[in-house]
Amino acid sequence: MTKTKLNKISDLAELAGVSTATASRALAGSSLVNKKTRERIIELANEYDFKPNELARNLRLKRTLSIGVVLPLGHEIGQNFSDPFFITMLGHLADGLTARGYDLVLSRVLPTNTNWLDRIISSGRIDGIVIIGQSDQSEVIERVGRTYAPMVVWGTDVPGKSYCSVGSDNRKGGKMAAQYLIEKGRKNLIFLGNIHAPEFAERQQGFAEACREAGIDQARTLDVHLTPEAAYSALVTHFGEGDLPDGIVAASDIIAMSAIRALTERQLNVPEDVSVIGYDDVPLAQHTAPALTTIRQDLLKGAELLIDLLFKRLAGEKTGSVVIEPELIQRGSA
C-alpha cells in the first residue's frame, strides 16, 4: 500500500509524536535533538517523502548560525580534504566564521547530477554558502547564483557571471611564472595541471601567452591530476618517455612537489637541470628540498574577503567580485 506523502512539518511532527520545533531541528541536523529521536524523524521523513526544501521555507524566521563550505570535485574526484590547499583555506574560513559566532558545515561533493547545490541550499542547515572552486560545475553555480544571494565562490572571475567571487588573477599568475623562467634562460617549458577547472585553465593561458610573446615554440601542456601520487605516476611515465623540459610551471604546489620528486629520481637536479615553479604557496612549499618557488595566492586575505562579502550579502547588500594580485615567491627550485 502506497503511503500518503506528507507536505507539512506539523504532520511529520504529529506522526513522530514530537513538537513541530523538534521535528524542524531534527531535519536540520541539530544536536539539540536526541540522536535516536533525530534518526527516527529523518526515517519517517524519507518514508513519507517529506522534502527538506519544505522545511527550509518554514525555517527562515530563524538563523541556523551555520555557513556551508562546499568543495565540488567534478574535475578531480580523487582530491581530499587533506590536500594542503584545502586544509589552509578551510582553516582560515573556520577561524573567521567562529569569530563571528557561526559554525562551518563542510561538504565534499562529487556531482552526479545538476541538483547537488540546490539540495545543500534547501537542506535547512545553513544560512549561506561558500564554494571553493568552480570545478567543472560553472553552469550549476551560475544557475543557482541568479536566484540565491548569500553565496560567494572562491575561483576565477568569469565575465558576466551572476554570482560573487573572490580569487587571484590566475592568468597573470601563470604568465608571471613563465616569464620568470624565460628570464632565467629556460626555453623548453611545460605546464602541468588539470585544465578542466577554470582556475587552472586561466593559469595555463597566462603561461601560453608568455611563451608566445617570447617566441618559444616548444611550450607544452600536460594534463596532470592534482593528487600527489597520481601526479607523480603520470610524470614518471612522461619523463621516462624522454620528454624532459628545462622549466616547469605547475598548476599547484602539490603538482610541483610531485614533479621535483619524479625529476630527482631520474638523477636530475632542481633547479640546475630543471627549474620548477608551483602555485598557491601552501605552508609546506617552503619546507621542500629545494624550497619551492611559487606564485602566492594570499589565502588568509581570500578567506577574510569570502566571509566579509558573504555576511554583507546575508544583510541584503549587493557586492561585487574581488580579484587578488598574485605574487612571485622566489626560493630554491627556480
Image: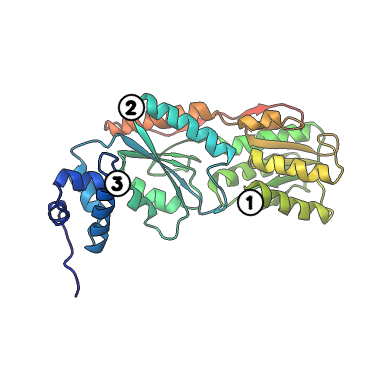
Q: Point out the frontmost of discs 2 and 3.
A: 3
Residue 300 x/y as whole percent: 51, 27
Q: Which of the marked residues, 1 or 2, is nearer the chain's N terminus?
A: 2
> Which kind of residue does numbered mark 1 sit on?
His
> Which kind of residue does numbered mark 3 sit on?
Lys
Q: How is the image coloured?
A: rainbow
Report, in whole angstroms, how far the alpha carbon at label 1 lies from the one at label 2.
Answer: 37 Å
Mark 1–mark 2 contact, CB under 8 Å? no
Q: Quadrant of the C terminus?
A: top right
Name the residue that disc number 3 marks. 35
Residue 124 x/y as whole percent: 27, 45
Report, in whole angstroms, how far the alpha carbon at label 2 lies from the one at label 3.
Answer: 24 Å
Seen in the image, is 11 located left or right of residue 267?
A: left
Determine whether the residue tagged by mark 3 lies in a helix, strand or loop: helix
The 10 Å Cα crowd at callout 3, few under 14, some 14 to 19, many 20 or more, is few
Report, in whole angstroms, how far the alpha carbon at label 1 lies from the one at label 3.
Answer: 40 Å
Q: Point out the frontmost of discs 1 and 2.
A: 2
Seen in the image, is 313 located left or right of residue 304?
A: left
Name the residue that disc number 1 marks. 225
